Image: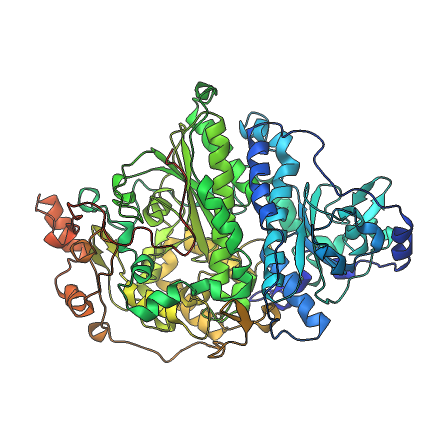
Amino acid sequence: MFFSTKGDRRAYHLGAYPLETLPRDDGIIALEAARPPIAAPKYQSPAKGPLARSLRAYLDIFIETAMGPPAVARAPVPDDPYRRMVDVKGYGYFMNASQVGICRIPANAWSGEGDADGRTAEHTYAVVLLLEHGRLPEAGNPARGWIEPALREAADARIGGIAACLSGHIRKLGFPARAHVMGAGALDMDRLAVLAGLAVRDGERLQNPFIKAGFSVAVVSTSYELALDRPLAGRAATRPGLAYWLGQNGATSGRERNRRAKRASHLSAYPMETVPRVERPTTLILDDEVPRVSKRAAFFDRALRGDLGEKARRERSRFAFKQPHTAGMMASMRAMVPIQGGESSPDAAPDDYSDGAANARALKSLSYLLGADLTGICEIPGYAWFSHGAKGEEITPYHKYAVVMLIDQEYDTMEGAAGDDWISGTQSMRAYLRGAEIAGVMGDTLRQLGFPARSQTNVDSDVLHIPLVLWAGLGELSRIGELVLNPFVGPRFKSVVLTTDMPLQVDKPVDFGLQYFCGHCHKCARECPCDAISWGGKIMFNGYEIWKPDAERCARYRLTNAKGSACGRCMKTCPLNKVVTADGPVMERLASWCGINARWLKPLLVPIAVWLDDYLGKGKRNPAKKWWFDLEVVDEICVEPVKGVSQRGLNLAHRIDPAKQKMAYYPANMMPVPNDLDAQPVDRKAAMAVGEILESPITAAIRAARGGAPPRYNIPTPPDPGGPKGARTQPTVYGNAGAAKS
């Protein structure tokens, strides 16, 4: 309780609700078999309002990826139906389903609307996915008018996306699978929810013992043999009891759910409103000296173009997608790109939304309904826009505000992982997928209301996210370098941004003492498998004060890691990667409170906290949270990982003398020609020499205060005056964006 909880020992595939404690009744199977067949569920009326229309458009994207042929060869998965079930249920919970159950498909559950080739005839198992509906914003919040007629659609779209990805995962394993969602399915999903032990019948309605009637369901049908759940007994509907409120068997407690439900809808689950706010980020930014850089300079893009050599180029095309869970997401991720932007409606009346504070509350409420974990808003500084896009085209800034949203990469799964094993890339991509859906729906809704808006995702973004996360008050820059830490979820998040001209009240940056903490903790540097994180002090890089990592070395390791699909060791092992909700250990919650509210104690507490983190084994793998299969996709077929699986533990004895750490830095003047898309090999030797000439933050601040000129290395490599050249048509990993910038 003090240092750990029952939740630490709860098997991941059991989910966040204590379904395993409910009474079961096999007699329900015969009752359901006797019920007559019904048609698959469909919407009975057109979508009501802009949000509902947007949600149905995104549900259509998932419908397009709901079925397809399985891989030509079956993956080397165990024959044990129970172990297969752990992977399938784990994936459902990892993708944020509220509850998951499995049953056989009785003949009368089919509506007769199977695939054109009859493929569903061989599907005998149903994976039933349930998602709780969100809640309505308070009266007076503009989002209430958007959300009230679309509450069901919001859950339908999210659970539909989960079903589509799960079906893609099973097909990648070499087994037939199809997602059945609202409006596009061939199954009686209510009947299957009853058989899978997720609901009981209450007349013509379904009731879940914990969620009651406010939920949506999707189903994945398959021939993949899985361990089954049993139907709930009728008396299960009388739950929950006291044990549920106390967190029975390590499940999320009723008191934690109640705490979240009592918070205003525009506030996250975490009390960000209690964190001190400041006028500027806690790290120095010389606004006038920060250059705009091109997307071409990002090392993952450089790898794609061949700048890092053939091996990195080849592996860039595989990267996180060489794992079947991620591979199951890719079709949906690609399909969202063409609708990230578009023209705003000329018939709307945007003048109805002149109150920036009310608009900000509305967009935050909407973001949390759709699945964001933390949201902040800022004006977009000029340097946050890329100078040139992925095809070498010049980018002209086009929106004033950024709605910045963080997606938690999921604590429990990270606990079960090494940080650089086969689930690591999937954690990132799952967050990117969710973010693309959230920002995409929000952008489309705003455009229907008459406001220019565009989602900026990992697939296609015209803005740099890091400065926007800082200015939106969602964290401080950390020793990890090009990564912001949040006081409640630490570094374990990915960001997505919605840019718009809708009038918005902005948030202020935060100061929770992270600069002191990171200055005295070196755990991320110690645990980095490629020594890419600095052991030394901060420097000035392109106008920023930063613990600058060796971004090239980091990118190479993440791309070419043969024992995993990427790397997130720094996130995995950071002492701020904790659970600080009502269900978290008392010590972690107390430490979090002290870190934010008793900063004068940091000189005393930080050394103790870092030592204790190691002493308790924080950052080690937790076997109870290991749910996934370690598999590698080679030539579109799943195989045992060719080079094995990372089993990395803590590296307590690892130390590097900062004076001897060899780091490569590529400032603005060493970045590639932004509109030359042919290979421009890196000069690592020259980049390693740059460290000798970079300014310290104190030196830079004094020089700038005296009116001194910025260093020449801050001036970016100019574009080729002849215009974009090189392989402009070279395919990208995700496919090309087809959306207008609006």
Q: Is residue 478 left or right of residue 71?
A: left
Point 43% across, 21% down: residue = 354
Is 246 situated above or below 363?
below
Relative height, residue 690 to residue 455 (above, below): below
Residue 687 percent location from the top left of the image: 18, 65
> Where in the figure is residue 431, as x and y percent of width and height?
49, 53
Q: Position of residue 185 (x, y in %)?
A: 70, 46
Which residue is at the front of the view, 672 or 483?
672
Please identify the quadrant where the N terminus is shown: bottom right
Position of residue 37 measured from the top left corner of the image (x, y, whole percent): 85, 46
Looking at the rendered structure, the number of numbered marks drawn on it comes to 0
Figure coloring = rainbow
Work out whether residue 709 or residue 615 is closer to the camera in this orientation and state it.
709
Q: Horizontal placement of 466 versus 410: left or right?
A: left
Residue toward you, 6 or 379? 379
Decide if residue 510 is in sight here. no
Instruction: Give me the residue at 10% from left, 49% from top.
Output: 703
Outermost front residue: 117
Query: Is residue 438 at least partly visible in the picture?
Result: yes
In this view, the residue in front, 660 or 596, is 660
Quarter that holds the C terminus = top left
Is residue 395 shown left or right of residue 224?
Answer: left
- Find residue 173 and report its image quarter: bottom right
